[in-house]
Image (tube, rainbow, N blue to C red):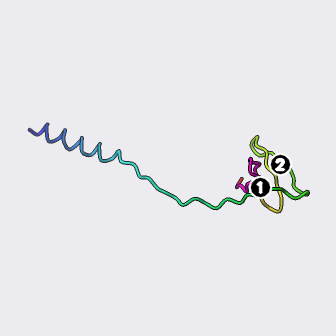
Amino acid sequence: MNRIIFIALVSIVLLSSCRSRVVVAEPQTVTVVKKLPRSYKVVKIKGHRYYYFNGRHYKKTRKGYVVVRV
């Protein structure tokens, strides 16, 4: 009888500890620039090409240039 109670308690503890927590975050605003000014600089960081202007890094996309954090 004690063995059955022990197995039941261990099963409850193991099953309850496998729960995961899901956090839903609001999407951040995205800044898209159609055309960069002429004075931008091309920089490579960790093998990726970025465009640097006015203290911000941009990544090229189909719709223009997106401000990214590097």
Q: Name the magenta segment's main secondary structure.
A: strand
Q: Splitting the image into 4 quarters, where does residue 58 fall?
A: bottom right
Determine the residue positioned at 67% across, 59% down: 30
Determine the residue positioned at 44% across, 52% down: 22
Amino acid beneath label 2: Val
Indicate whether 30 appears above or below 13.
below
Q: Which residues are magenta?
A: 58-69
**In front of the other: 1 or 50:** 50
- Relative placement, left or right, of 6 versus 36 is left
Q: Which residue is mark 1?
A: 57
Q: Which residue is mark 2?
A: 43
- Relative placement, left or right, of 46 versus 11 is right
Determine the residue positioned at 54% across, 61% down: 26
**In front of the other: 39 or 2:** 39
Amino acid beneath label 1: His
Determine the residue positioned at 87% across, 53% down: 41
* Magenta residue check for 59: yes
